[in-house]
Amino acid sequence: MAEARRSRPSWDEYFMDIAFTVAQRSTCDRAHVGAVLVRDRRILCTGYNGAPAGLPHCDDVGHLMVDGHCVRTLHAEQNALIQAALHGVSTEGATAYVTHQPCLTCAKMIINAGVRRVVYAGNYPDAYSRDFLAQAGVELVHLPRRRPGDSVYRPEPESSPAP
């Protein structure tokens, strides 16, 4: 019985696993990113990176690269926040589970949407986003995924180097 209980994922692990599943819907092969917005252990909405609705996907027509970034796509966090807005769902006080650390633009959107906590797995080299989130009082939690397919996470202090 104790062994079964030990293998049960925490809520953070559970929702992060869902974010990785959502990421599989991504339509940009440069990065598969998923986001899940949660409040009170209930999923509010999800998002993944891809082209705006009705426009061609990177997977179909190629990337539109500017300064090393594909500008054809919306980020997963942006799509999740847009889905919440479209369906009248408040994100005030929510937690965002994201497969990658948010970029600066997504961090600013997260702040203005009232999200209070961000849990992410993969690092993204953007110190500004971390600084903005901290200044706004948004908790940032690094929950790295050890291996592809691994559903066991181990939180690390923010100062630890990426695995």
Image: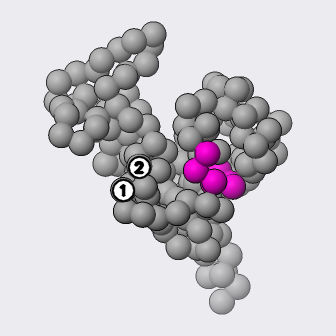
Rendered location of residue 53, percent (x, y) = 24, 42
Q: Residue 6 is drawn in which quadrant? A: bottom right
Question: From what the image shows, is residue 99 above or below residue 15?
Answer: above
Q: Amino acid at mark 1?
A: Leu
Colouring: one colour
Instruction: From the viewer's perspective, tell me whether residue 93 is left or right of residue 34.
Output: right
Identify the residue under disc 2.
82
**Residue that sits furthest to the top in the current view:** 67
The one nearer the camera, 163 or 82, is 82
Identify the residue under disc 1.
86
Q: Residues within 10 Å of mark 2 (few under 14, many from 20)?
A: some
Instruction: From the viewer's perspective, tell me whether residue 144 is left or right of residue 156.
Output: left
Quarter containing the N terminus: bottom right
Q: Residue at x 55, y 31 (%)?
A: 105
The one nearer the camera, 28 or 107, is 107
- Residue 62 can be seen, yes or no: yes
Rendered location of residue 133, percent (x, y) = 72, 40
Question: From what the image shows, is residue 74 above or below residue 77?
Answer: above
Task: State the separation of the CA atoms marked 1 and 2.
Answer: 6 Å
Per the rendered image, the range of residues in magenta is 112-118
Label 2 secondary element? helix
Q: Residue at x 59, y 68 (%)?
A: 39
Q: Residue 151 is drawn in which quadrant? A: bottom right
The reply to whether discs 1 and 2 touch (Cβ–Cβ < 8 Å) is yes
Q: Residue 8 is drawn in which quadrant? A: bottom right
- Residue 147 can be seen, yes or no: no
Instruction: From the viewer's perspective, tell me whether residue 35 is left or right of residue 7.
Output: left
Q: Residues within 10 Å of mark 1 (few under 14, many from 20)?
A: few
Quarter containing the C terminus: top right
Label 1 secondary element? helix
Q: Residue at x 18, y 40 (%)?
A: 54
